[in-house]
Image (spheres, rainbow, N blue to C red):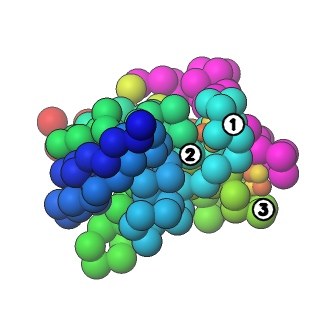
Amino acid sequence: MAQQQTLRLRINGQETPLTLDSRVTLLDALREHTDLTGAKKGCDQGQCGACTVHVNGERVLSCLTLAAQADGAEITTIEGLAAPDGTLHAVQQAFLAHDAFQCGYCTPGQIMSAVACIREGHAGSDDEIREYMSGNLCRCGAYTHIVAAVREAADQLQGAAHESL
Ligand code: FES
Ligand code: FES
């Protein structure tokens, strides 16, 4: 028998209590039980990366994460990436500048993945970016532009981190 559970998720800095069937994935909790539809469902089987969000700062596939596993955790979705005044994150800005998307369906996952990829220190070269972004599929074939965008954002963010040392 399915059980209802009340979870306390912190989504983009806001306490979000949700009472859900214990089988609900984090992706469906976000998309169907809050108004956050940025994370996309491309496969629901962990193979495409369209559902990538951050849980406690780490990239996860939200289609393979039960909402219950994220109880009490800090979740960041694409909607929470820009600054409160609307200033885009460096990765969002770089995706625009480099035309790193066409249909935009893979883009929230690509961007969340790229932010984590840079934070993990896996954006040192184009080859490394290609490898560590390979969990995010793009049917529009924007890969070359995605690598360029991640490279630029990484240089910018790492440069900024260096200056603040
Ligand atoms: S929808 Fe999660 S990996 Fe495809
Ligand atoms: S921009 Fe269309 S799937 Fe990537």
Task: Give coordinates of residue 111: x percent, y percent.
Answer: 53, 49
Q: Which numbered disc, 3 or 2, marks the residue closer to the eye? A: 2
**Marks 2/1: CA–CA distance:** 8 Å
Question: Helix or strand or loop: what does disc 1 sit on?
Answer: loop
Distance CA(mark 3)–CA(mark 1): 16 Å
Q: Position of residue 160 (x, y in %)?
A: 30, 46
- 98 on left or right of 38: right
Label 3: how many Cα within 10 Å (few below 14, some 14–19, many 20+): few
Q: Tell me the amino acid under the disc marked 3.
A: Gln
* Residue 17 located within the stretch drawn in magenta: no
Q: Which residues are magenta?
A: 121-149
* Residue that label 2 marks: 51
Residue 93 is marked as none
Above or below — where is 90 with respect to 44?
below
Residue shown at 37% from the left, 72% from the top: 87
Residue at 31% in and 33% down: 69
- Residue 102's label in the rendered image is 3
Dot 2 beta carbon under 8 Å from ligand 1 = yes
Percent coordinates x, y for residue 104 in the rendering = 70, 61
Residue 48's disc number: 1
Could one spot residue 128 in this view of the protein?
yes
The answer to which quarter of the image holds residue 97 is bottom right
Q: Nearer the viewer, residue 42 or 33?
A: 33
Q: Position of residue 33 (x, y in %)?
A: 42, 64
User: Of circles 3 and 1, which is in front?
Assistant: 1
Element type at mark 3: loop
